[in-house]
Amino acid sequence: MTEAETGIASVRAVEPSRSIEPAAILAEWYDRYARDLFRYAFALTGSAEDAEDAVQEAFAGAARQSRRLLRVRQSRAYLITATRNAAYSILRSRRRRGDLLHSLVAEENPHGAAPPALSIQSTLRSCFGELPIEQREVLALKVFEEMSFREIAQATGVSLNTAASRYRYGIEKLRKRLEEQEDE
């Protein structure tokens, strides 16, 4: 992997008289990125608990490699990659346990039909959850994190064309599925 792909520089200039504590770096990153990382992990896993676990594991992994933090140039890309890896690990674990029925759909209103706004939101979540994980991931990074296709390609380890096509196919599948839902 190249320096740009990992987000890690070979050398980072640090003032000799000032030491940077890894805990301070992590605290700053957490304050800046945790909410966005949670949203991204939720899009991948479909579960708030799993998303929290993925973000926690990303930061725990960074803490375990504290010397490496001083060389990170692109903190956002580094954390997105770490969160992605943790989320995929959770999904693999879930698959092994046979627990693939985690739902992105909010619970139905037990006293009747959901209000129209909740119904639309529920339908959108359901359709989003039906997309292949690769397409969900690219859509989440593009829409929620406002990343460029180049940034998405670097974060996910795919080509620029693959990132763009996953986005396009995901949008098309969402559109088609939403139209089907509307006709029902």
Image: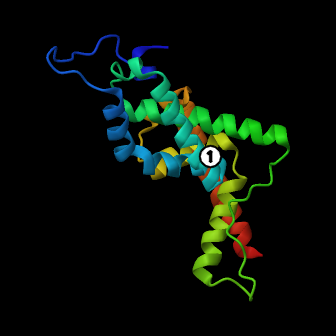
| The one of 139 and 14 positioned closer to us in this rendering | 14
Residue type indicated by callout 1: Leu
Left or right side of 84 for 91: right
Residue furthest to the top in view is: 10
Q: Which is more toward the observer, 131 or 16?
A: 16
Q: Residue at x 73, y 59 (%)?
A: 103
Counting from the top left corner in percent of width and height, residue 136 is at 61, 47
- Residue shown at 71%/81% (left/top)? 109
Tell me which colouring the rendered structure shows.
rainbow
Please indicate whether residue 136 sits to the left or right of residue 25 in the image. Answer: right
The answer to which of 184 and 17 lies nearer the viewer is: 17
Q: Quadrant of residue 48?
A: bottom right
Q: Residue at x 67, y 34 (%)?
A: 89
Circle 1: element type: helix
Give the residue furthest to the right. Answer: 98
| Image quadrant where residue 74 sits | top left
Please provide percent x and percent y for residue 177: 70, 61
User: How many neighbours does mark 1 have within 10 angstroms: few (below 14), some (14-19), or many (20 or more)?
Assistant: many
Residue at image position (66%, 36%) is 88
Quadrant in the picture for the C terminus: bottom right
Residue 85: image location, x then y, percent? 59, 32
State the residue position of label 1: 44
Q: In the rendered view, does 147 fall on the left or right side of 131?
A: left
